[in-house]
Amino acid sequence: MSRIAIYAGSFDPPTNGHLDLIQRSLGFVDRLVVGVLNNVAKAPLFTADERQALIRACVDDARVDVRIFRGLLVDVAHEVGATLVIRGLRVVADFDYEMQMALTNRQLAPALETIFMVPSLETAYISSTLVKQVAQFQGNVSGFVPPPVAAALRAKFPRT
Ligand code: PNS
């Protein structure tokens, strides 16, 4: 039986940290569904279509399927046949929120396991929120995101 995982997030925008986790996940899953969802607590800069296109531009692997979803993560996982949810734990500050989400999802769908992954040391500090701040004030984001995302950020925040 093939092992399907869902790596869900808002990916607004996708960063080198997200790409690192996608590559790491492919070390132990047969198929990875990258689920672009909206985090209701955040207003996205990029549309879901843009985020999907950016991830697709950066990931070239037939085992990865990038899709846009609405609704609950547990329902999305069920829909795609995923038994695993991948989440990255970057810093201690992530822990409370991630633990609450994982336990809430377990209450909703007991058979769905959340896997917390440790990112590479080089990407562990990168956050989409901070990348957007840097881009907004014309900072250099090339150390945080792949070239297609850097170009998309420049287009969102043109020099005036
Ligand atoms: O990258 P993010 O913003 O940390 O991703 C959070 C996301 C989108 C995975 C989370 O908000 C989510 O799962 N949203 C879908 C709605 C849902 O299932 N909420 C309850 C989860 S406990």
Image (cartoon, helix red, strand yellow):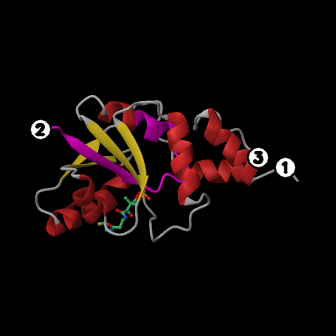
> Of callouts 1 and 3, which one flags the residue occurring earlier in the amino acid sequence?
3
Q: Look at mark 3 in the image and give the residue it sits on.
A: 138
Please state which amino acid type lies under the numbered disc 1: Arg
Q: Is residue 133 left or right of residue 67?
A: right
Number of marks in the rendered image: 3
Q: Quadrant of residue 150?
A: top right
Please tell me whether mark 3 or mark 2 is closer to you in this view. 2
Assess disc 1: are there few (<14), some (14-19) or many (≥20) residues with their C-alpha within 10 Å of its C-alpha.
few
Question: Could you say whether the residue bearing mark 3 is in a helix, strand or loop?
Answer: loop
Q: Quadrant of residue 54?
A: top right
Please tell me whether mark 1 or mark 3 is closer to you in this view. 1
Q: Is residue 154 left or right of residue 70?
A: right
Assess disc 3: are there few (<14), some (14-19) or many (≥20) residues with their C-alpha within 10 Å of its C-alpha.
some
Q: Position of residue 72 (x, y in %)?
A: 31, 68
- Residue 118 appearing in the image: yes
- The range drawn in magenta is 1-21
Spatial CA span between label 2 and label 1: 51 Å
Q: Look at mark 1 in the image and give the residue it sits on.
A: 159
Please tell me whether mark 2 or mark 1 is closer to you in this view. 2
Spatial CA span between label 1 and label 3: 7 Å
Q: Look at mark 2 in the image and give the residue it sits on.
A: 1
Q: Is residue 121 left or right of residue 137?
A: left
Assess disc 2: are there few (<14), some (14-19) or many (≥20) residues with their C-alpha within 10 Å of its C-alpha.
few
Please state which amino acid type lies under the numbered disc 3: Gln
Q: Position of residue 60 (x, y in %)?
A: 46, 30
Please state which amino acid type lies under the numbered disc 2: Met
Q: Quadrant of ligand 1?
A: bottom left
> Of callouts 3 and 2, which one flags the residue occurring earlier in the amino acid sequence?
2
Tell me, for residue 18, which label it has, or none.
none
